[in-house]
Image: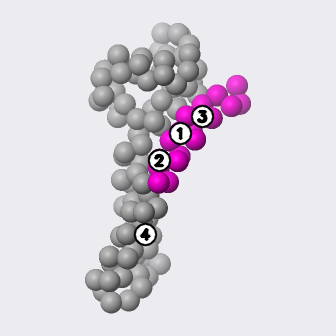
Amino acid sequence: GYYVGYFTTVMREIPFSLIQFPIYEGLKKRWSNWQGHQVSPLQSALCGSVAGGFSAAVTTPLDVVKTRLMLGKDAHGVAYKGTMDTISRVFAEGGVAKFFS
């Protein structure tokens, strides 16, 4: 049971990082260019917060799948049988919107 959801955790973390870090670096670069010097640590933290928030919003569906797999069963006690089964069952419950709830 320890590794339940490991694959989906990795499947979520890689896209999250691939989205977050370029946005973070891009925001810092634009802010630095705009003000004419490097961003301060506080400004850098704000860039990271925006980048992380956006990345989290985009990867929320993957996080929903990961959480469901780690829980093991749905509300009716029926076990999930892998990532694709979880995705199809979440979609069947409420369409795309269910991945964001």
Q: Name the residue beneath numbered marker 3.
A: 7
* Distance CA(mark 3)–CA(mark 2): 13 Å
Which secondary structure, mark 4? helix
* Distance CA(mark 2)–CA(mark 4): 16 Å
Whether 11 is drawn above or below 14: the answer is: above
**Does the residue at mark 3 contact the one at mark 1 (Cβ under 8 Å)?**
yes
Number of numbered discs on residues: 4
Which secondary structure, mark 2? helix
Q: Name the residue beneath numbered marker 4.
A: 25
Identify residue type, mark 3: Phe
Residue 11's tag is 1
Question: Where is residue 23 drawn, in percent x and y?
Answer: 39, 62
**Does the residue at mark 1 contact the one at mark 2 (Cβ under 8 Å)?**
yes
* Distance CA(mark 4)–CA(mark 1): 22 Å
Residues in magenta? 1-18
Task: Indicate yes or no whether the magenta region holds residue 11.
Answer: yes
